[in-house]
Amino acid sequence: MLREDRETRSIDARIERHLADRVDGEQHWMARKSLYETGFALVSYVLPQDVKERLDEEMAALIDAQSIRRDMRFAQTGNSPRKMRNVSAADIHQHNGPVRELYDSPALRGALSAVAGEDVLTCPYAPEHYVITHLERPGDTHGWHWDDYSFGVIYVAEVPDVELGGFVQTVPNTVWDKSNPRVFQNLVDNPIVSYSLRPGDMYLLRTDTTLHRVHPVETGGRRTIVNMAFAAERDLSKEIDHETMEELFHV
Ligand SMILES: O=C(O)CCC(=O)C(=O)O
Ligand SMILES: [Fe+2]
């Protein structure tokens, strides 16, 4: 395909073509098995390289122009820290670029549904659609937490070598009791699984039943991701209070 074609086609059209040409049922099946067994599945194969490059470019520009530094702790997740720079969903929406296009892509949701074995739906709460998170200072971390909706899809634009931290840690099959999160008890009672990632990776996580964090980065470690939240059918009838999100973004 001509370079201009790759650059001008919509993200959705590029993913659709890539899935038809390059992705087979076996890849989805391996990911589905991993998601069922561990709550985590690497789905990097769903995106073509040119889409990844468009995401990387927009994310770097938004971090430079519109990110806000946070240093907070949340009682609802056992006072775990958030030390990071963020670009909010409102600013990503307003910028109206590749990240928003990716989130809205029916081809992406179709591939994710094939992996999940159930419909992966747009999240009913717009401030959780997407958030960009950048770790840049020693000790920066996205501390232990669960998320409100069933699925998180995390695209990794930038991540340091594992020796500089910034790897993902999970505790599958855990339950978020917002009034008594018992994070440390969950860590003591269960095995923790750790994943090192590379730039251009994307993973699908059962974020409502998988306690997870990003290990703090060391000096020189830089990490940039976009987290996109998607719902399952069962989420649509749940009462969700969005409190940690509201504290973070004053939405
Ligand atoms: O940075 C990551 O890999 C995970 C992000 C995450 O858990 C979140 O944004 O809720
Ligand atoms: Fe999360």
Image: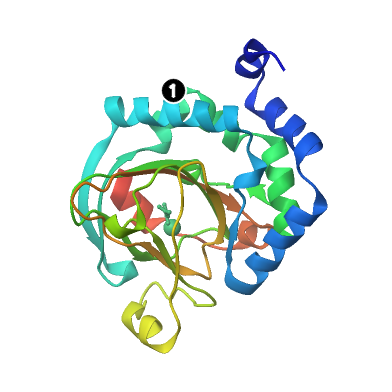
Q: Is 30 displayed left or right of 240 in the figure?
A: right
- x and y percentages locating residue 54 in the rendered image: 51, 26
Q: Residue at x 37, y 52 (%)?
A: 245
Depth check: give the residue in front, 41 or 77: 41
Q: Residue at x 68, y 59 (%)?
A: 31
Q: Is 69 displayed left or right of 235 in the figure?
A: left
- Mark 1, Cα crowd under 10 Å, few <14 / some 14-19 / many 20+, is few
Image quarter where the C terminus lies is top left
- x and y percentages locating residue 247 in the rendered image: 29, 52
Q: Quadrant of residue 108?
A: top right
Depth check: give the residue in front, 241 or 25: 25
Q: Quarter of the picture for ligand 1?
A: bottom left
- The amino acid marked with disc number 1 is His
Q: Quadrant of residue 235?
A: bottom right
Q: Is residue 194 visible?
A: yes
- x and y percentages locating residue 186 in the rendered image: 40, 82
Q: Is residue 180 visible?
A: no
Q: Residue at x 72, y 26 (%)?
A: 13
Depth check: give the residue in front, 169 or 241: 169
Q: Residue at x 76, y 39 (%)?
A: 22
Q: Vertically, is 193 above or below 82? A: below
Image quarter where the N terminus lies is top right
Q: Vertically, is 164 above or below 223? A: below
Dot 1 falls on a residue whose secondary structure is helix
Q: Name the residue carrying label 1.
A: 95
